Amino acid sequence: MEKKKKSSVSKKLEECEKEKEEYLYGWKKAKADLINYKKEEASRAESLLKEKKRGIILRVVSVMDSFDRAVEEAERKEDSFYEGFLNIKKQMEDVLKKEGVEAISSLGEEFDPSFHEVVEMIEKEGVESGTVVEEVQKGYKMDGELIRPSKVKVAL
């Protein structure tokens, strides 16, 4: 009878060990799933924040376009507000720079479809074909990524 009892206890012990391994495996899997979920959520939150920042920057860049036009007009008329415009424009440029935004250099550069959008092809003597001869609207990059292409006129 004692042998039967030992066999029964041994069997029960094996079952408990097996259950323990199953529970341990389940716990480890749940822990790994939670870690992966946290990483995915952090990545998603970062992506949403980046997209929101991009939207705000695009609106600010539109304001910069208006400042550029106002400065050009003030230069032509030698307006007394000219220096004020320049100071405000410089402040806006500094804010954009702190956010990782930089203007794309276009004038005199070779046309690059990754950064430029052609609005017109024009004949220009002494200029190599495919060269940007006029920038209609500045393009911008944020943290090295294109947020708005430059609208340009290109030599034929």
Image (cartoon, rainbow, N blue to C red):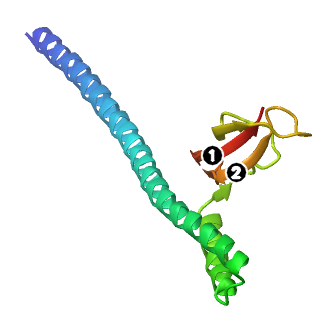
Residue type highlighted by circle 1: Lys
Please give the label number shown on residue 137: none
Residue 88 placement, left or right of 55: right
Please give the label number shown on residue 135: 2
Which residue is label 1 attached to? 151
Residue 7 placement, left or right of 22: left
The residue positioned 63% from the left and 46% from the top of the image is: 151
Q: Is mark 1 on a helix, strand or loop?
A: strand
Q: Position of residue 122 (x, y in %)?
A: 74, 38
The part of the image, by quadrant, that contains residue 3 is top left
Q: Where is residue 93 in the image (x, y as percent from the top left)?
A: 64, 69
Residue type highlighted by circle 2: Glu
Q: Quadrant of the N terminus?
A: top left
Furthest residue to the bottom?
Answer: 80
Taking depth in this image into account, of 125 and 103 the one nearest to the observer is 125
Relative to 36, is 133 above or below?
below
Q: Is mark 2 on a helix, strand or loop?
A: strand
Q: How crowded is mark 2: few (under 14 residues within 10 Å), some or many (20 or more)?
A: many
Residue 33 placement, left or right of 110: left
The residue positioned 66% from the left and 40% from the top of the image is: 116
Q: Position of residue 10 (x, y in %)?
A: 20, 15
The residue positioned 52% from the left and 67% from the top of the image is: 63
Mark 1 or mark 2: whose residue is earlier in sequence? 2
Q: Distance between the residues labelled 1 and 2?
A: 6 Å
Taking depth in this image into account, of 144 and 43 the one nearest to the observer is 144
Q: Position of residue 132 (x, y in %)?
A: 77, 42
Q: How crowded is mark 1: few (under 14 residues within 10 Å), some or many (20 or more)?
A: many
Furthest residue to the right?
Answer: 126
Tell me whether circle 1 and circle 2 mark residues in contact (CB < 8 Å).
Answer: yes
Q: In which quarter of the image is the C terminus?
A: top right
Residue 13 placement, left or right of 123: left
Taking depth in this image into account, of 106 and 100 the one nearest to the observer is 106
